[in-house]
Amino acid sequence: MTSPYSFESVDLAQFGHEDRYKFLMASVIPRPIALVTTLGADGFVNAAPFSSFVVLSVDPPLLGISVARRDDGSIKDTYRLVEASGEFVIHTVDTAMAKQVQQCSAALGPTQSEVEHAGLYLVPSIKVKPPRIAQAPIHFECKLHRIEYFGDRRSALIVGEVVQTHSREGLVHGHRVDPLEADILGRLGGGVYCSSTVIIKP
Ligand SMILES: Cc1cc2nc3c(=O)[nH]c(=O)nc-3n(C[C@H](O)[C@H](O)[C@H](O)COP(=O)(O)O)c2cc1C
């Protein structure tokens, strides 16, 4: 049977860094967002969103986030603090938190808190030192499992072992989170987001 589809085919080596970034990030969609809290030695709480976020293993339970360097080559606070402390909390977020997620991505500098900037409530974790964000529906307390480097060390895959979870009361039914109730926020390309509430049952 002859396919009715036609394609535009591109070798990504033809693109510069920025266009390659745009193409990849707008093509691998939707991506759930990991809002990650880390703690500085001075007690400062850092929060930042990462949509390069994946479940890597179930036994042990491993989650991965890919943290790139900034355009100027500098290292992001999340990477620095995870490497130094070995502990972090990953939260999935709902659509009500879309603006706060955006606010947490601002590069505020090491002495300004994204948490205050975005009006987030903090609650203590049980097994790690960084606190959790109360508004988020699902929380994974993580201990650093390992860091893998890619692309001339510009990107680091931070792998965390989940040592404790928390979910908003009533959200989990028989070990499953109801995507309609949870209304999880996903990222599409170019600052556009989607919700887990559009359900398809093939
Ligand atoms: C929705 C969203 C998703 C993002 N995903 C990533 C990502 O997967 N990897 C990354 O390096 N930066 C990502 N960013 C950018 C970081 O959040 C941003 O660089 C932030 O300032 C890092 O903060 P930090 O220095 O406190 O770690 C994302 C931003 C937004 C708004």
Image (cartoon, rainbow, N blue to C red):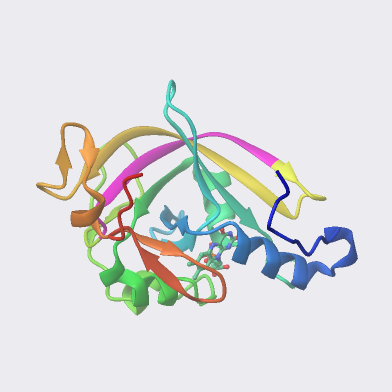
Q: What segment is highlighted magenta in the picture?
A: 136-148
What residue sits 67% from the left and 61% below the top? 24
Location of the C terminus by quadrant is: top left
The reply to whether residue 112 is in sight is: yes
Looking at the image, residue 196 sits to the left or right of residue 63; the answer is left
Main SS of residues in magenta: strand
User: Residue 94, position in %: x, y?
Assistant: 29, 62
Looking at the image, residue 95 sits to the left or right of residue 147; the answer is left
Outermost residue, right side: 14
Residue 31: within the magenta? no
The reply to whether residue 74 is in sight is: no
Which sits in the foreground, 36 or 39?
Answer: 36
What residue sits 16% from the left and 32% below the top? 174
Location of the N terminus by quadrant is: top right
Q: Against 86, is 80 above or below? A: below
Q: Against 12, is 130 above or below? A: above
The quarter of the picture showing ligand 1: bottom right
What residue sits 26% from the left and 45% below the top? 125
Q: How many marks?
A: 0
The quarter holding residue 172 reads: top left
What residue sits 48% from the left and 59% below the top? 30
Residue 143: within the magenta? yes
Which sits in the foreground, 69 or 43?
Answer: 69
User: Residue 114, position in %: x, y?
Assistant: 40, 72
Which sits in the foreground, 152 or 187?
Answer: 187
Which sits in the foreground, 37 or 12?
Answer: 12
Outermost residue, front side: 1
User: Residue 200, position in %: x, y?
Assistant: 33, 52
